[in-house]
């Protein structure tokens, strides 16, 4: 771990028994912020690629919710005194952008498999987000800077997003692998 990963003033709080390890929490939350940034970009990209289709009509509001969840994470980080590490976010953004150029068996147009893979990517991202909300919710029992009700709502929304994405993924796999798409 480099010194740039440790928020200022966290060294003493990291050593006090019973207090939050702000140094480690900062790394953890910045990793989640990177994932949230990548997920937000990918959700908007997929929704735009599906614009005008039934799938796009479901993904458009979902992409907006995923962006709202990222903003919620930033607000929580602010309340905890955890600064966003721009270099991590930029690295994640670059990786997401580069991932758009992976071979998909087609040269000019989208492969039918692309939608399945993108939905699975979003599903995994939302599962990671839900894990982060669960962890923060557990910490909210002993840290007044964390709002248990807000975290319950964020977790509930993530679970609804997971159900929606799984339904979309299942439908897409049936269309692709059974030749209905």
Image (cartoon, rainbow, N blue to C red):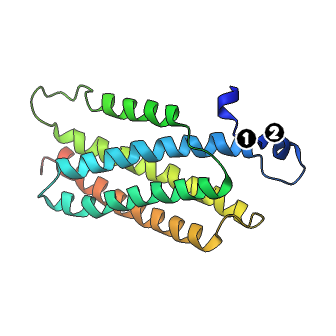
Numbered badge on residue 23? 1
Q: Number of labelled discs?
A: 2
Extreme bottom residue here?
A: 149
Q: Residue at x 45, y 53 (%)?
A: 126
Q: Position of residue 56 (x, y in %)?
A: 19, 57
In the rendered image, residue 77, in percent from the top left (x then y), is placed at 60, 53
- Pick the quarter of the image with the N terminus: top right
What's the residue at 9%, 29% (across, down)? Answer: 108
Q: Crowding near pointer 1: few (<14 within 10 Å), some, many (20+)?
A: many
Element carrying mark 2: helix
> How packed is label 2: few (under 14 Cα within 10 Å), some, or many (20 or more)?
few
Q: Which residue is mark 2?
A: 11
Q: CA distance from mark 1 to mark 2?
A: 7 Å
Residues at discs 1 and 2 in contact (Cβ within 8 Å): yes
Camera sees residue 135: yes
Compared with residue 117, is residue 157 higher up or lower down, i.e. above or below? below
């Amino acid at each position: 771990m480099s010194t740039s990963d440790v928020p200022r003033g966290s060294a003493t709080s990291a050593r006090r028994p019973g207090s939050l390890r702000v140094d480690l929490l900062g790394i953890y939350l910045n990793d989640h912020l990177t994932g949230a940034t990548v997920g937000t970009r990918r959700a908007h990209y997929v929704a735009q690629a599906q614009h005008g289709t039934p799938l796009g009509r479901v993904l458009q509001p979902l992409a907006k919710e995923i962006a709202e969840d990222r903003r919620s994470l930033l607000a929580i980080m602010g309340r905890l005194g955890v600064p966003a590490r721009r270099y991590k976010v930029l690295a994640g953004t670059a990786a997401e952008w580069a991932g758009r150029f992976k071979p998909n068996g087609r040269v000019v147009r989208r492969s039918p498999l692309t939608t399945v893979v993108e939905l699975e990517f979003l599903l995994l991202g939302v599962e990671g987000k839900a894990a982060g909300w669960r962890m923060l919710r557990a910490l909210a029992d002993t840290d007044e800077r964390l709002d248990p009700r807000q975290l319950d709502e964020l977790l509930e929304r993530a679970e609804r997003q997971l159900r929606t994405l799984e339904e979309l993924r299942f439908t897409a796999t049936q269309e692709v692998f059974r030749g209905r798409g």
